[in-house]
Image (cartoon, rainbow, N blue to C red):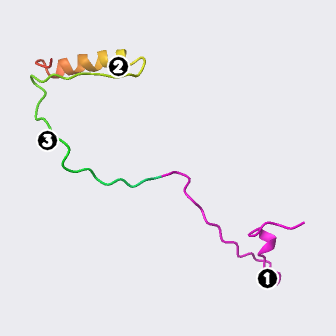
Amino acid sequence: MALPLGYASDRQDKSSGKSDIVLEVLNPRGVLHSVPVTGLAAPRLTDLAGKKIALLSEKPDVAAFYDALGKLLKERYPTFA
């Protein structure tokens, strides 16, 4: 029976009993390096006082989270609308 190339007995040095197998380990995650985005972001706000914020989502069951978030924002920023 023939063994696949790289199998231990395929590459074993008969005189010393040692094998010189080289394994190449690949990363299965597809990591894409992104180019930093510049010039598109507005400067950060210094305060949320008097600002209007819309909490929107198409995800189900997000209402409870948004209720809690809205309450927290109103506590921290009383003029939050």
Residue at 78% over, 80% down: 13
Q: Position of residue 80 (x, y in %)?
A: 14, 20
The residue singled out by tag 3 in the image is: 43
Residue 8 falls inside the magenta stretch:
yes
Residue at 11% over, 31% down: 47
User: What residue span does the magenta drawing correspond to?
Assistant: 1-30
- Three-letter amino acid code of the residue under disc 1: Ser
Q: Residue 6's image quarter? A: bottom right
Instruction: Look at the picture and state if 18 lies above or below 48.
Output: below
Disc 1 versus disc 3: nearer the observer: 3
Apparent side of residue 78 relative to residue 57 in the rendered image (left or right): left
Q: CA distance from mark 2 to mark 3?
A: 27 Å
Dot placed on the residue nearer the N-terminal end, 1 or 3: 1
| Quadrant housing the C terminus | top left
The residue singled out by tag 1 in the image is: 16
- Three-letter amino acid code of the residue under disc 3: Pro
Mark identifier at residue 65: 2
Q: Position of residue 10 (x, y in %)?
A: 80, 73
